[in-house]
Image: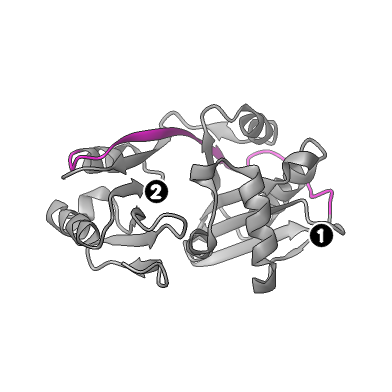
Amino acid sequence: MSSDHPLRWSTNGLRVRISQTNNSTAHITPLFPSQKLLKTQVLREIKILRTNGIQEIFTSALGPNEQRFFMDLGFNLHEELSLLAHNFDKPIDFPTRPTRRVRRSDWATVLELDNAAFSTFWQFDTSALAEALAATPKTRVRMDATDTALGFAITGRSGRMAFLQRLAVDPGHQRLGVGRSLVADSLQWSRKRFVRELLVNTQVNNFAALSLYESMGFIKKRDGLAVLRWNGNP
């Protein structure tokens, strides 16, 4: 399977992305709740991927019901994530730093920031960035507007639900208010569109991110999320 076209819609209820750094790895996102997915169709998609040289498949971050569905197909836990929510019942911060819209010409800078901020598994490549931008009907992408961009954020909205899909800050400039200002921008944008809840997830051991979100009014939900991995016969 060529990585020239790494992102595609599957007729089997999944969105599939082939890694640009490892052509034997695929990432899948279910397009429907687990009760609307058919195991036979998902197994068919796995077979198609295997036929095209895929040896390892990772899911997107899944809730408990989706986790059970994919574990029944032979997927195993790869990493647990904390899920936090802001319901706008308290005053929210205003951004303290200028931002500007991210243009296509900024993608190289965005990816450089992203790769510096995250470990290898979580790093965006071009196709992962494109997938994030296309994940919701409405998307806001802002970057720090100082002389040298120090961070960016992607916020998506679907109806009255919003998602802080990505927050990355240059590691050499953390704890300077860059991330806090970008999160505030996301909150303000969401509130102006009458969003009921803004969700964000992060690794359970990312204590700096958890501290930032909780200090800004996000509350950790009881049920977290998880990324699952398949690397064998279903």
**Vertical comparison of 158 with 203: above or below:** below
Residue at left 39%, top 60%?
17
Question: Residue 49, percent across and down?
Answer: 24, 59
State yes or no: residue 10 in magenta: no
Question: Residue 135, percent across and down?
Answer: 47, 61
**Vertical comparison of 231 with 42: above or below:** above
Q: Is residue 51 left or right of residue 9?
A: left
The amino acid on which the numbered mark 2 sits, given as a three-letter code, is Ser
Q: Furthest-right residue in view?
A: 147
Figure quadrant of residue 100:
bottom right
Of the pair 31 and 22, the residue shown nearer to us: 22
- Is label 1 in a helix, a strand or a loop? loop
Q: In what quadrant of the picture does the N terminus appear? A: bottom left
Question: Residue 105, percent across and down?
Answer: 68, 72
Figure quadrant of residue 175:
top right
On residue 60, the disc is 2
**Vertical comparison of 200 with 111: above or below:** above
Give the magenta-colored segment's residue range.
Answer: 72-97
On residue 145, the disc is 1
Q: Furthest-left residue in view?
A: 40
Residue 221 visible, this orientation? yes
State yes or no: residue 95 in magenta: yes
Closer to the chain start, of discs 1 and 2, is 2
Residue at left 73%, top 58%?
143
